[in-house]
């Protein structure tokens, strides 16, 4: 034993941490049969309640873009298919009558194992994540207004999923916005289709060299941005066809966008490419795969980058700084001290273990939530709502109900 202690003391801090994690995991595996132990050791906390005046409704849809072949497969008959979730304001009475609170992790029997694989964790460690609930009510009637509601698109990170920033989504919706997010098929950790099939994550292959990087990441990023533009195309078609109230309420000629990590790069691309998207935010966005043509053009639309103080790859902020310098519109780079990459998702809000394992930084979760949410809300209030400075909630001064 003394020899082991002496040997352990000679190891680097990284190796000592790795060995401790190994023994901790071994102990957890030994306790896995006790279903009550893991939730006590590594609990998941309820999502913080949104602060706006409105209750939240949600619905989920599955759409196929017949104009695009699926980039991730070799089947010439395989067209791009995505799952879309919409969150919208509703009245408290309508939310109560819906009586179905949407789970944070829908269809957990199909999600837990692929999510665990993506996180490189045993499935039993996150099994109790299925107990988490959102604040949205499935199928609740939308709250009607005399004016259309502004729309914000959300794009998840590499291996993430459409609900990974529910804290920000619900805050925006509780203040009157409609938020639409997609599972970027094969780029999400898993996309679940209604026919029982699924599409697991395929977008993290081994890449060797710059040429291969662009051969892979270029089409992937273009596919993600096209997903968001397709969503707007589909909503326009539904509106033209006189579809349900949920679609008729959306103002889709002045749309906002935000995204995390690879979703931040996606937000940059759709903001650059789609004239309907007029303002955007990247949450610790991965700028490296953004093409040089976009970097050198910059923005003529408002844009904020919020992120951690430093990336391991210095190229990330080198490209960001060049893009902002080329921009003619109001842009901002806000780096938050004490944060890490996953602080800009729901991770620190639902799990204290994330900090113990080094996934999140030192900023307390409530403070982090307030700072990110207030930045998003203030930005979209200033730049999105019919391009003037009125608050979104003023839309309901002429409520039609």
Image: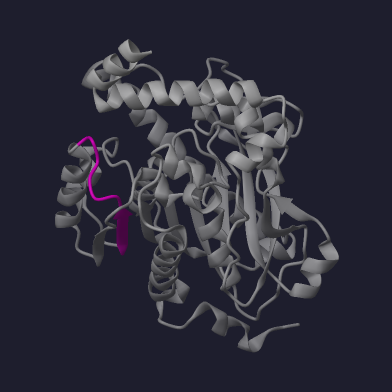
Q: Residue furthest front?
A: 2
**In which quadrant is the N terminus drawn?**
top left
* Residue 124, image quadrant: top right
| Looking at the image, residue 33 lies above or below residue 248 | above
Is residue 320 visible to the viewer in this orientation of the structure? yes
| Looking at the image, residue 183 lies above or below residue 390 | above
- Which residue occupies 67% across, 35% down? 37
Q: Nearer the viewer, residue 13 or 253?
A: 13
Give residue 209's position: percent from left, percent from top: 23, 17
- Which residue occupies 60% across, 22% down? 29
**In which quadrant is the C terminus drawn?**
bottom right
Left or right: 256 in relation to 183: left
| Looking at the image, residue 237 lies above or below residue 388 | above
- Which residue occupies 45% across, 21% down? 22
Give residue 285's position: percent from left, percent from top: 34, 46
* Residue 251, image quadrant: bottom right
- Which residue occupies 20% across, 58% down? 327
Q: Nearer the viewer, residue 59 or 373?
A: 373
Q: Nearer the viewer, residue 80 or 319?
A: 319
The count of marks equals 0
Give residue 238's position: percent from left, percent from top: 67, 55
178 in the magenta segment: no
| Looking at the image, residue 111 lies above or below residue 149 | above
Stretch of the chain drawn in magenta: 302-313
Is residue 122 visible to the viewer in this orientation of the structure? no
* Residue 139, image quadrant: bottom right
Left or right: 184 in relation to 205: right
């Amino acid at each position: 034993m003394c020899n082991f202690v002496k040997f352990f003391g000679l190891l680097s801090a990284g190796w000592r941490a790795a060995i401790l994690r190994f023994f901790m995991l071994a102990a957890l595996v030994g306790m896995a049969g006790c279903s009550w132990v893991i939730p006590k050791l590594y609990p998941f906390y309820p999502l913080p309640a949104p602060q706006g005046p409105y209750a939240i409704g949600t619905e989920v849809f599955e759409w196929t873009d017949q104009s695009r072949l699926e980039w991730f497969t070799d089947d010439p008959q395989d067209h791009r298919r995505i799952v879309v979730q919409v969150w919208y304001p509703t009245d408290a009475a309508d939310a109560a009558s819906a009586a179905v609170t949407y789970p944070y992790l829908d269809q957990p029997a199909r999600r837990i194992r692929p999510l665990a694989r993506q996180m490189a964790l045993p499935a039993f460690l996150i099994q109790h994540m299925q107990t988490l609930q959102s604040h949205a009510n499935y199928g609740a009637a939308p709250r009607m207004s005399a004016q259309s509601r502004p729309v914000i698109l959300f794009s998840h990170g590499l291996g993430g999923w459409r609900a990974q920033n529910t804290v920000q989504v619900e805050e925006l919706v509780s203040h009157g916005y409609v938020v639409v997010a997609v599972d970027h098929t094969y780029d999400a950790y898993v996309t679940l289709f209604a026919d029982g099939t699924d599409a697991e994550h395929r977008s993290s292959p081994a890449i060797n060299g710059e040429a291969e990087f662009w051969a892979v990441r270029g089409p992937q990023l273009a596919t993600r941005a096209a997903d968001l533009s397709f969503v707007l195309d589909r909503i326009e078609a539904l509106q033209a066809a006189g579809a349900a109230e949920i679609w008729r309420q959306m103002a889709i000629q002045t749309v906002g966008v935000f995204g995390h990590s690879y979703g931040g790069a996606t937000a940059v691309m759709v903001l650059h490419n789609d004239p309907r998207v007029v303002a955007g935010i990247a949450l610790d966005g991965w700028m490296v795969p953004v093409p040089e043509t976009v970097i050198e053009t910059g923005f003529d639309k408002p844009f904020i980058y919020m992120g951690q103080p430093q990336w391991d790859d210095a190229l990330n902020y080198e490209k960001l700084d060049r893009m902002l310098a080329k921009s003619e519109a109001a842009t901002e780079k806000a780096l938050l001290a004490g944060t890490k990459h996953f602080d800009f998702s729901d991770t620190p809000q639902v799990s204290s273990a994330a900090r113990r394992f080094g996934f999140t930084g030192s900023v307390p979760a409530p403070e982090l939530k307030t700072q990110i949410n207030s930045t998003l809300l203030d930005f979209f209030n200033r730049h999105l709502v019919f391009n003037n400075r009125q608050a979104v909630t003023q839309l309901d001064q002429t409520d039609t109900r």
